[in-house]
Amino acid sequence: NAGVTQTPKFQVLKTGQSMTLQCAQDMNHNSMYWYRQDPGMGLRLIYYSASEGTTDKGEVPNGYNVSRLNKREFSLRLESAAPSQTSVYFCASSEFKGFETYEQYFGPGTRLTVT
Amino acid sequence: KQEVTQIPAALSVPEGENLVLNCSFTDSAIYNLQWFRQDPGKGLTSLLLIQSSQREQTSGRLNASLDKSSGRSTLYIAASQPGDSATYLCAADSWGKLQFGAGTQVVVTP
């Protein structure tokens, strides 16, 4: 199993450009997540999808949109990139472990720089 | 709002010493607490998950404890090795969403 995969690994954008970050998992997990990680800070949740066909905002959703294309794929779109969106973006999926417990598994990340 | 704090932010120890990493959280109504390892430029690897009904979990040289009443979790790494050098993050699961601490950067010197 590849686990959680993300493309691209690196990206440089100019302010105002748009792009989509792709994420796929092959573990048949229902829930998927997008986080961003900034220096000196922990990961912050941008959006999540509890199941195919549903999406919900996390802690920092402004400037982003998501699409849960099917059970495997969850994409994150930046419509008009801003320098404040320079960050490392992680996708994750989670496995139900019983009694309200979900263990999350992470992709390798996408390093995005907006100039 | 759940807040998660990890102290210290950085730690350097000689090889063979035991590591003690601390994690505190403000809201004790958590489902579980998860510890991750992150190597430079890499993603997160899950180390241990402690369910809210459990007090501790063990895996090899790693042991994590959870005290919900005091809002604390501790990760112990026995007999540290240079390969343990990484950033360790804890995350509290509140209502199905993870709230992360900023991490403790660990360096184990040979």
Image (cartoon, coloured by chain):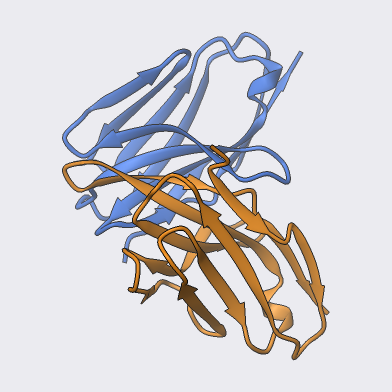
Chain colours: A orange, B blue
Percent x, y of residue B93: 31, 51
- As drawn, A39 above or below A52: above
* Left or right, residue A12 beside residue A4: right
- As drawn, B49 above or below B62: below
Percent x, y of residue A24: 54, 56
Going 53% across and 37% down the picture, which residue do you hit? A1
Q: Quadrant of residue A14?
A: bottom right
User: In which quadrant of the rendered image does the C terminus of chain B lie?
Assistant: top right
Residue A26 can be seen, yes or no: yes
Q: Nearer the viewer, residue A100 or B3?
A: A100
Percent x, y of residue A87: 68, 66
Going 24% across and 59% down the picture, which residue do you hit? B95
Q: Nearer the viewer, residue A20 or B56?
A: A20
Q: Quadrant of residue A115?
A: bottom right
- As drawn, A24 above or below B7: below
User: In which quadrant of the rendered image does the N terminus of chain B lie?
Assistant: bottom left
Going 48% across and 31% down the picture, which residue do you hit? B21
Percent x, y of residue B61: 48, 13
- As drawn, A97 above or below A86: above
Going 40% across and 72% down the picture, which residue do you hit? A58
Residue A60 can be seen, yes or no: no
* Left or right, residue B88 beside residue B29: right
* Left or right, residue A48 beside residue B109: left
Q: Quadrant of residue B109?
A: top right
Q: Nearer the viewer, residue B32 or B16?
A: B32
How many numbered marks are there? 0
